[in-house]
Amino acid sequence: MKRGLKFSFGLALALVLTLLTVTGAVATMLLSAQEVVENTAVPMAKENDTDARVVDTYTPEQLTQLIKTANENGITLDETAGIMRALRSGEGYWEDEAVMEICRAAFGGPFPDWTIEEKRWYSSVIAKITGYPESEAESYPLPGPGDMQPQEARETAARLLKEKYPEAAEIENAGLYRRIEFFSPGWDENDQPTEPFYSFDFKPLDLRYRAFSVVLDRHGAYQSDDMTPSLLEGPYTARDLESAVGDVYRAATGTQFSWSQEAWHAFGEYLPQADRSQGWGMQYDAYLQSVYPLPTAGDMPLDQAVEIAKKDAGCDETGDVEKVLLSDGGAHVWKISFQPKTDQGFGDWTTWEIDAGTGEIRYRGRANTALRWSLYVLSATCDEIAKDMLKQEEALGLAADALRTAYQDDSLPFTDPAAFQAFVSYMDWRGVWSVRFRTKDLRYGSCAVQITEPDHAVTVTEQEPMTPDGDSLYRRWQEVYSYGEWDQETWIAFSEALSKTEPKEWKGKLLQKTVYPPLSAAKITLDEAVDVAARANDWPVSEATRATLLSMDGKPVWKIRLSGGYNDWLYEIDGDTGAILNREAYKPDNYDFDDPVSMFTLRRDYAPAFLAAYGPEWAANVALCKAFADLSFDEPDLGCLDESLYQTTVEGHTVTFTALQKDQPSYRVVFTEEGLVETAEKLP
């Protein structure tokens, strides 16, 4: 059920090296990004699809050809991007993400920065690749024949703002401002479509400048505008500055990981003026003692510094690379941090400080990832700032000792990586270490500790029993075997272990009642069952994300979850005949709405257990929300359980919600003797 397949790493590496040298041998007539996508990416995606469902990943061979075609046509992809990491690792890659990364490189930025025409083209292409209906692209319409066209709207927006605000004189300067433009369908308060409109945001590329926005109707008439002062015009905190830097310098994420060196330089320039009375932590003291220069002609490029670090680590591939250029006594130093990838997987986070002029490695050491900010300052600066703090290993040891005392068992192997996975973090704003030990062995329970600075007071915040019972055994197996993403052999072993316990809660009893047969019990294969579900599904594109083989009265039943279009569907399919036995839809990951246990048990067993556990009112409310509510919401939103809106009556197997207001409908749900929903209806 995983996306992406492996192929020869040696072949992938050879192809990467070929791609890096192909720039001098481009095609005589270069294709545009649109042509590369339409002529290569879309046909490749269609090749993977079956008659029943859309396959959403390129094979490694297809990915190689796609990147080669992009490179030959002058589209250079960021070597740190996911698509390039997938290529170097010999893996496939998601089709929509591959197209997005090609377009980011070609169009010069993230999706919001693209033109109205590019957004519409992209959404239409994605509809073709994914099999979504073309109507899904209607969120990004193009103006019609009677509407003002985009180029004229851009000129009108800029002219109106410059006329009103003298400070907006440079908003058309692409070196100072980025323009974010949309032609959007409007919606009224009742979610009914209204006239589309233009919106233009002019975001500064320098913290000293103000931001501007303007809204025009579809014909170009002025609707509204706004001007936002720059951060530097008023008091600001260090956190305000971090947020503004991320926005102004177009950070791809909300963390420093995606900051450019220009962003770090601006941050270092304006941090000394920040208000230190709120939200100031020791990381800002470390940043204050650091200098973030702009690269000079004498500095080696970032990728060269990364290669030096990789060679020193003895690896060809890494995970995400943290990077920043620092000044140390006038010399420029690249600080590079990553996890080296080996045949055994990813190693420990390691930091290198490399002289940007000579390539000399000045420092090499294990990265202190608990102090995230340590990756962006010189190691000597970090050591000085944090000299009175616990080290990461010390916090880990204190936590382990406290838990051994709490359990009264000195033999518990909390620091053994084969028994526990340790997560250590430091929350600067609270001055608290958080240490969690997640079990990797069924014999042990997960637990957690907090340690305060500077007094090093230890508090045990989570203490699971080492010996689980019938009600906690499922959680223990989730910890060890990745939260239900189990193969059939794991389900069989879990069922055997659970059979030796006596659960008291409904989930444990339900799981104990469920039989998980071997895969050989089914005549219909998993792929065949997924095809059956996909053909019957009312959303044209859906991905099978979970599948388990169950037993109903001795007969095999495939339980399959399809995901797509913001909903999930659960199918029960006869493992002998391929007949659909049951189907239901719900919001994914909404544990209050539909417990995840429903994915691994038969509906005929789950429904009455849920009804008994939560009562008929809640079970009826869930049934009505599945029938009538918008499942894109995280919670059922019909309001049936609101006593100010509805009067609830339970008579036998019937639950009636009578509206107390004239403009609200009434509802009725009837359950069968077995606890299944017989009818869920609005009343006239």
Image (tube, rainbow, N blue to C red):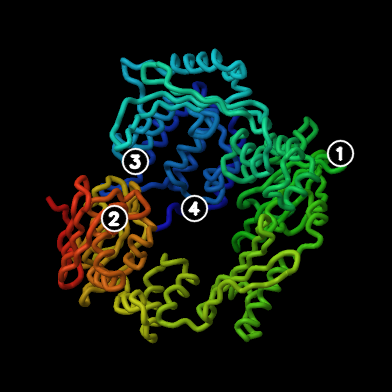
Determine which quarter of the picture holds residue 294: top right
Q: Are marks 4 and 1 in contact (CB under 8 Å)?
A: no
Q: State which tag comes first along the sequence, 2 or 4.
A: 4
Using the image, tell me which numbered label, if any, was put on residue 644. Answer: 2
Question: Tag 2, which secondary structure?
Answer: loop
Foreground label between 1 and 3: 1
Give the residue pinned by disc 3: 46
Question: Tag 4, which secondary structure?
Answer: loop
Foreground label between 2 and 4: 2
Question: Tag 1, which secondary structure?
Answer: loop
Q: Give neighbour class at mark 1: few <14, some 14-19, many 20+ (Cα, 10 Å).
A: few
Determine which quarter of the picture holds residue 14: top right
Q: Nearer the viewer, residue 654 or 41?
A: 654
Q: State which tag comes first along the sequence, 4 or 1.
A: 4
Q: Is residue 572 left or right of residue 11?
A: left
Give the residue pinned by disc 4: 7
- Asked if residue 348 can be seen in this view, the reply is yes
Q: Give neighbour class at mark 3: few <14, some 14-19, many 20+ (Cα, 10 Å).
A: some
